[in-house]
Amino acid sequence: MTAIPEGYILFKKVDYDVLIQTIEELKQKVQTLTAKIEELEGQLHQNSQNSQKPPSTDAFKKPIKNSREISNKKQGAQNGHEGNKLKMVGMPDKIIEYKITWKCQCGIDLNEVPLKGLSKSRNLSYLIS
């Protein structure tokens, strides 16, 4: 039996060929994945300023910082606040009369039912039958 020098190992030619083939396959995968990473990093740095992309596709923007101070008050009008509302007018500019052209489920023509009241909304009045 021959002595194997220090730092060397002994194995069959078939095992060596399989090992070399596996190494070559892994080298190809590393090259493919490296190219894909470079492509994706290039896409990551594209925005509407340096490419043909529309501004709506810009991602990873810094959020707008709100400069308002935080308060303990609720949103909206505070308790005791008198609201300013649009007052109802005494004489409206227009009076709109709605003519009802359909019948009730019981068969009565609703256009023949007498007027029951008048509803007002800002500067318009509505006749309700």
Image (spheres, rainbow, N blue to C red):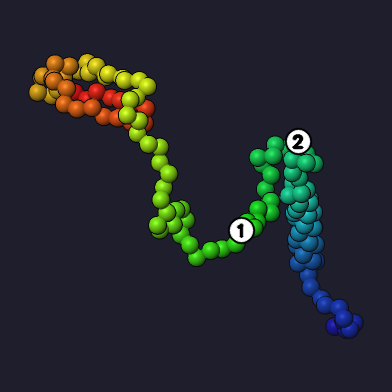
Residue positioned 10% across, 19% down in the render: 107
- Relative placement, left or right, of 35 versus 68 is right
Give the spatial CA distance, label 2 vs label 1: 36 Å
Residue positioned 40% across, 57% down in the render: 80
Residue 43 position within the rendered picture, expressed as x and y whole percent measured from the top left = 74, 46
Residue 118 position within the rendered picture, expressed as x and y whole percent measured from the top left = 23, 27
Q: Amino acid at mark 2?
A: Gln
Residue positioned 43% across, 44% down in the render: 84
- Relative placement, left or right, of 100 versus 28 is left
Identify the image quadrant of residue 34. Answer: bottom right
Tell me whether the residue at label 2 lies in contact with that at label 1, contact meaning CB atoms closer than 8 angstroms.
no
Q: Label 2, on which residue?
A: 52
Q: Secondary structure at mark 2?
A: loop
Is residue 2 visible from the viewing direction of this image? no
Query: Eyeballing the image, is 72 above or below 112?
Result: below
Q: Residues within 10 Å of mark 1 (few under 14, many from 20)?
A: few
Q: Label 1, on which residue?
A: 68
Residue that lies at the very extreme toward the right in this rendered image? 5
Residue 75 position within the rendered picture, expressed as x and y whole percent measured from the top left = 47, 56
Name the front one of labels 2 and 1: 1
Residue 35 position within the rendered picture, expressed as x and y whole percent measured from the top left = 78, 50
Q: Secondary structure at mark 1?
A: loop
**Quadrant of the image for the N terminus?**
bottom right
Q: Amino acid at mark 1?
A: Arg
